[in-house]
Image: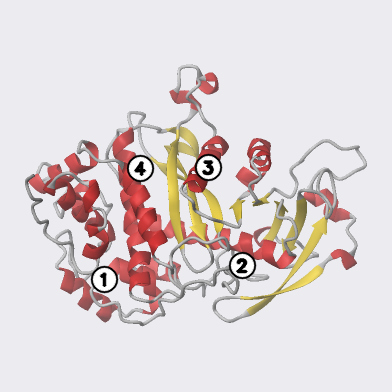
Amino acid sequence: MTARQPCPPAPGPLEAFAAGFDPLFGSLGQRRGFRGYLGGLLAPRDRNKTLTALAGAEPVVQAQGPEVQRLQYFLSEADWSAEVLNARRLALLQAEPATAAHRGGVLVLDDTGDRKDGTATAHVGRQYLGSVGKTDNGIVAVTTLWTDGRVHYPLHVAPYTPAARFAAGKDDRRFRTKPRIAMALIEQARATDIPFRAVVADCFYGDNTELQGLLTQRRIPYVLAHRGTGGLGWALAEEAHSFAEALRDLPRTAWQRLKRRFRDGHDETWWAAELAFLHFGPRRTVRAFCITTDRRRLPSRTTWYLSSNLGGASLEEITQLYAWRIWTEDGYKRVKGELGWADFQVRGDTAIRRHWALVCAAFSSCWWQAAREGRLTAPRPDGAGLPQARAGRAGTGEKYPPGEPPLLAEGAASGASLAGTFPLAHALLEGPGTSAATTRTRGAAWGLRSRRADQPLSPELLSRLG
C-alpha cells in the first residue's frame, strides 16, 4: 500500500484539530482543502467569505485561479461526506471533558433564514427569514445546539425546503415542516448519545401542537415558549384559553420572587408564577409558567410564557434552562455571521450542506482548542453550579443589553494569552477586552493571504460581542 503523502500543516493550533479529520479524506488534495477552508473561515472578515475570499484571491479577476478552483472542487465534487465529518466533529468535542455534553445541559432548537436571490439554488424560496424579520427570498436551516451556559455548539443541521418547490406542494411526500425536521434532528442527537436535561425552543416551535405531541409521545423532556395571547386549546367561554387570560385573575400571592445572579456579577429580581388552565397545572403532566421582570406591566421583551413536562423541576430550574436558549441563540447568530454561514455561492444541496458542516467545524475548533489549553472548566457530573445566562435587564426594553459576557468561553478570561490563534478565534474566545495592537501582532504571525493580516475585528462586531 502506498504511504500517505504528508499534508502541509494548518497554522498553529488549528493543525491539531484538523489532523483529527484526516482519516475522513482519501487524498492529499482533500486534506489540504479542509485546512484551507477552515483557515479562511477563521480569518478576520473584510468581505463575504466566498470561495475567492477563502482562497485569498481577488473577486472576479482571480475567480478562475487554481486555488479557487481547488476549493470549489473540494466543496462541490470531492468524495467526502458532510454527515461523517459532522459526526467526527462531535466525537472530538465529546472526548474533551470541558466540552462534552452532559445531562445538565439542554438541546436548543433553532432555525436561521438568510436572503438568497433566484430559485436555482437548492431549498431557496420565498419564506419567512429570521435574519431580516420578514418574508423574503432565501434559504432556511433548522439546527439543534447543545449548551450548559458555559459552552454552546451546533449538533446537527438540515435545510427546510418550501412547499412551493415541490410539484404537489405540501401534499408531496418529500415535504417536511420545520417541526418535523426539528424532531428528526432531536432523534439524531439521541442516536449520537448526546445527553440533555430538556429540549428548549421559542414560541414558533412551542405553539406547534404537532411537535409537542411528538415530544410527549416519545417521552422527551422539554421547556417550550409560547405566545401570551395565542389560544392553546378548547375550553368553556368563561375559562382561560391562553396565558394572558390565565394571568388576568391570578392573585398577587401566586407570584414568587426569583433572585438571579448573572455571569457579570450583578443580581436581578424576577417574578414567576405557575398557572392552571386548559390541560396545564401543578399536578398535571404539563405545567405552565409565566416568568417576568415586572409582574404588573409584563414587558414583552423580558416576559416568558413557558410550558414544561419536567416533573419536579423548580421555578428556578425552568427559568435557567430557558435563559440558556436566549444566550445561545444570540451568540450562535453572531458567530454564524462572522464565519460566513450564508456567504456560500454554490447551488447544489451537497455543497450547501458541506459548507454548513465546515462552518460548524470552524466554530467548534475554538471551543476544542480552549478546552485543550485548559481554559474551560469541566462541569460537575450532575451539571450543578452552572452559570445563569443573561436574559435581559429590567426596564431597559433590550433583549440583549450591553455588558453581556464574551461570546464564547466563560473560562477564557478577557486579556488572557492565546498566542498563535486566529485573530477571529481569539476575539470570539476573549471578547472585546483585546487591544487592537495585540490583535495586529497575532494576525501578522499568521501571514494570511486573503487580506491584510493585521486588520482587527470591526468596532461594530466588538460592540456586539460586548
Viewer-proximal residue among 193 and 399:
193
Mark 1 or 3, which is nearer the eye? Answer: 3
Residue extending farthest to the top is 168
Q: Distance between the residues labelled 1 and 3?
A: 35 Å
Earlier-in-chain disc, 1 versus 3: 3
Earlier-in-chain disc, 3 versus 4: 4
For the N terminus, which image quadrant? top left
Residue extending farthest to the front is 1
Label 1 crowd bin: few (<14), some (14–19), many (20+), radius 10 Å: many
Q: How far apart are marks 4 and 2 (CA)?
A: 36 Å
Viewer-proximal residue among 196 and 415:
196
Q: Are marks 1 and 4 in contact (CB under 8 Å)?
A: no
Label 3 crowd bin: few (<14), some (14–19), many (20+), radius 10 Å: some
For the C terminus, which image quadrant? bottom left
Label 2 crowd bin: few (<14), some (14–19), many (20+), radius 10 Å: many
Q: Position of residue 358 (x, y in %)?
A: 31, 50
Q: Position of residue 127 (x, y in %)?
A: 49, 35
- Which of the 4 image quadrants contains residue 13? bottom left
Earlier-in-chain disc, 1 versus 4: 4
Provide the residue designation for mark 4: 83
Q: Distance between the residues labelled 2 and 3?
A: 32 Å
Amino acid on which disc 1 is placed: Thr
Q: In the image, is residue 55 above or below residue 409?
A: above
Determine whether the residue tagged by mark 2 lies in a helix, strand or loop: loop
Give the side of residue 176 with respect to residue 139, left or right. right
Provide the residue designation for mark 3: 187
Q: Residue 392 carries which label?
A: 2
